[in-house]
Amino acid sequence: MRHAVNTTRSTTIQTPFEHEVAERLVAALQLEVTAEEIAPEAPLFGEGLGLDSIDALEIALFAGRDYGVALRSEDPDNKKIFSSLRSLCAFVQANRTAG
């Protein structure tokens, strides 16, 4: 079981799609936080949820499977795409072909 803590509290509320993706993040990565505890603009990596490169691969897998979105390791925009739940969701919504 992973230990992830998102200590960043935000007054920003998750959109319904952000909540859906947050639930998938929690399930796919076996996070010890609830989807509701993931602040939309908090960092996913580092001091935020503390995700790592293996987690990024898991996110890419479920994004492809559930939404038909291809996240590629060589994409120069990955730092921005993976910077927060909100930015990940914006990318998925702009590029989705499924779900």
Image (cartoon, grey):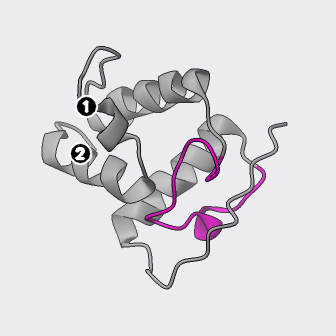
Location of residue 53 in the rendering, given as x and y in whole percent from the top left corner: 56, 23
Contact? badges 2 and 1 (CB < 8 Å): yes
Among the 4 quarters of the image, the one containing residue 15 = bottom left
Q: Is residue 68 depicted above or below 22 in this figure? A: above
Q: Quadrant of residue 98?
A: top left
- At 45% from the left and 65% from the top, the residue drawn is 40
Q: Nearer the viewer, residue 61 or 12?
A: 12
Within 10 Å of disc 2 (Cα), the crowding (few <14, some 14-19, many 20+) is: some
Q: Decide if residue 17 is on the left or right side of residue 23.
A: left
Callout 1 amino acid: Val
At 61% from the left edge and 37% from the top edge, which residue is drawn?
28
Magenta-drawn stretch, dominant element (helix, strand or loop): loop
Q: Which label sits in the foreground, 2 or 1?
A: 2
Q: Is residue 86 magenta?
A: no
> SS for tag 2?
helix
Magenta stretch: give its range: 32-49
Toward the viewer: 46 or 60? Answer: 46
Instruction: Please provide percent x and percent y for residue 3.
Output: 82, 44
Secondary structure type for disc 1: loop
Return the disc, 2 or 1, that comes first in the chain's sequence. 1
In the image: residue 88, left or right of residue 7: left
Total of numbered circles in the picture?
2
Amino acid at dot 2: Phe
Alpha-carbon distance for marks 2 and 1?
9 Å
Residue occupied by mark 1: 69
Residue lying at the far top in this picture: please name it.
74
Q: For mark 1, does the 10 Å Cα neighbourhood hold few (<14), some (14 to 19), or many (20 or more) residues?
A: many
Residue shown at 43%/73% (left/top)?
14
Q: Which residue is mark 2?
A: 91
Q: At which x and y percent is residue 95? A: 16, 39
Pick the quarter of the image with the C terminus.
top left
